[in-house]
Image (cartoon, helix red, strand yellow):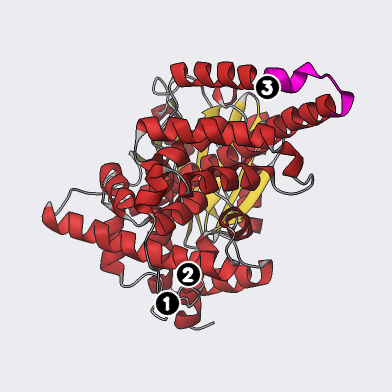
């Protein structure tokens, strides 16, 4: 794909509207072309900023109460001639409404969480001081977090694994503090985020979740009351290898 | 935010007025209840609700006020790249929420609604096309033009207020 072709498809790419094959082609190009990647990032930032800025208004409690009353009042004659099919339709309507709301809430909350985590990663990399504790020694990095976080975690033995620990910082996500650890593997940077699991609401509650978006790989899982997220531009296999090391360390 | 709250948010952006937004949501819900028979099961419930809201808006006072906007050559996706030049992209990352809200408010309704449905409501292009009863190609060209117009508004605002601080 040429830069022009990529530029023409950046909007549907950022809006997740491309076919899987086109997505893959775009990602291959974006990995190697910093100009197009910067454009994509610019568009994505704009989209995220619009999403936050656009969710501006909430109905007042008084209006919600009035709505419930007015719908009840208007629908009384409707219910008056009780006929089963109508009731069935109403029941279906209620079910549909609840289903639509729940689905929507789950999907958007999950995506938002993913994007926020990806943002934390990108922001750290863009910073002139990506880490607050600079050390490749896990016996330095782990104690640094003592007293800064309401939990403790184990760091893996990295010898001969290809991964290097570069340091860590305290990260904040949905009003709770957690650890952000930076690792490298063959020039790729990986962020590992660790948060207490009970503070997490809906998304990523159970199991391992992997996803690819904007050429970033993510993997998330729970272990020992902690929720782990990895975000990186490294290949999925590397992300998974690091997750295995962290899981092993957590169990030891 | 549950669907009711989302409908209100969308109505408020369309009408740009608290009272008119409440009227619009109320009328939409009543129409939806009354016209539930016209909802074909298996089709998109959310798009159906937004379509009612948006059609109700078009015939409301606020909608008629906002109505006559001519969008030339709608279906042609602009030939220029969607995002033009890195400095602009960087600029966007440094504008604040208020500037984005002001830019959204200043956009003509056809652009504002398509951006809200895509970026805030996170609808697929197909779903937006169903909601607005326009072809998917038109959704894409409106999005592209709308976003470009927004970037220009943000750039203007930023020039006026002088260079801003760092990333937010």
The quadrant in which residue B70 appears is bottom left
**Which SS class for mark 3?**
helix
Q: Residues within 10 Å of mark 2 (few under 14, many from 20)?
A: some
Q: Are marks 1 and 2 in contact (CB under 8 Å)?
A: yes
Which residue is more in the foreground, B14 or A148?
Answer: B14
The disc placed on residue A75 is 3
Q: Earlier in the sequence, mark 1 or mark 2?
A: 1
Quarter holding the N terminus of chain A?
bottom right
Answer with left or right where residue B133 lies relative to residue A135: right
The disc placed on residue A218 is none
Percent across and percent down for residue A45 are: 39, 54
Quarter holding the C terminus of chain A?
top right
The CA distance from mark 3 to mark 2 is 41 Å
Start-end of magenta stretch: A75-85
Identify the residue under disc 2: B141
Which residue is more in the foreground, B106 or B53?
Answer: B53
Identify the residue under disc 1: B78
């Amino acid at each position: 794909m040429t830069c022009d072709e990529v530029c023409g498809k950046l909007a549907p790419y950022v809006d997740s509207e491309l076919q899987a094959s086109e997505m893959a082609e775009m990602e291959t190009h974006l990995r190697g072309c910093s100009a197009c990647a910067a454009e994509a990032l610019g568009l994505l930032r704009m989209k995220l900023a619009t999403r936050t800025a656009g969710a501006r208004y909430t109905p007042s409690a008084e209006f919600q109460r009035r709505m419930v009353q007015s719908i009840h009042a208007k629908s009384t004659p409707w219910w008056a001639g009780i006929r089963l099919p109508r009731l069935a339709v109403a029941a279906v309507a209620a079910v549909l409404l609840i289903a639509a709301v729940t689905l929507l809430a789950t999907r958007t909350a999950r995506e938002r969480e993913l994007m926020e985590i990806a943002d934390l990663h990108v922001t750290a990399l863009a910073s002139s001081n990506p880490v607050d504790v600079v050390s490749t020694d896990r016996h330095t990095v782990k104690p640094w977090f003592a007293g800064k976080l309401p939990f403790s975690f184990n760091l893996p033995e990295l010898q001969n694994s290809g991964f290097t620990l570069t340091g860590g910082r305290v990260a904040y996500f949905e009003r709770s503090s957690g650890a952000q650890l930076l690792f490298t593997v063959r020039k790729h940077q990986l962020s590992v985020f660790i948060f207490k699991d009970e503070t997490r609401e809906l998304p990523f509650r159970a199991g391992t979740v992997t996803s690819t978006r904007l050429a970033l790989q993510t993997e998330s899982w729970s272990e020992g009351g902690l929720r782990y997220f990895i975000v990186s531009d490294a290949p999925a296999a590397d992300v998974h290898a690091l997750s295995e090391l962290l899981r092993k360390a957590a169990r030891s | 935010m549950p669907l009711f709250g989302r409908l209100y948010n969308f109505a408020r952006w369309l009408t740009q007025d608290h009272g008119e937004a409440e009227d619009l949501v109320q009328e939409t819900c009543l129409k939806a209840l009354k016209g539930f028979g016209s909802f074909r099961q298996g089709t998109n419930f959310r798009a159906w609700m937004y379509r009612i809201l948006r059609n109700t808006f078009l015939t409301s006072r606020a909608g008629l006020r906002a109505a006559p906007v001519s969008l030339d050559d709608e279906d042609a996706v602009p030939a220029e790249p969607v995002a033009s030049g890195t400095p602009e992209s960087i600029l966007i990352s440094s504008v604040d929420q208020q500037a984005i809200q002001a830019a959204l408010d200043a956009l003509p309704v056809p652009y504002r609604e398509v951006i809200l449905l895509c970026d805030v409501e996170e609808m697929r292009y197909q779903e937006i096309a169903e909601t607005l009863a326009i072809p998917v190609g038109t959704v894409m060209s409106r999005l592209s033009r709308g976003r470009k117009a927004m970037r220009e508004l943000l750039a203007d605002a930023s020039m006026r207020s002088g260079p801003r601080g760092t990333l937010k």
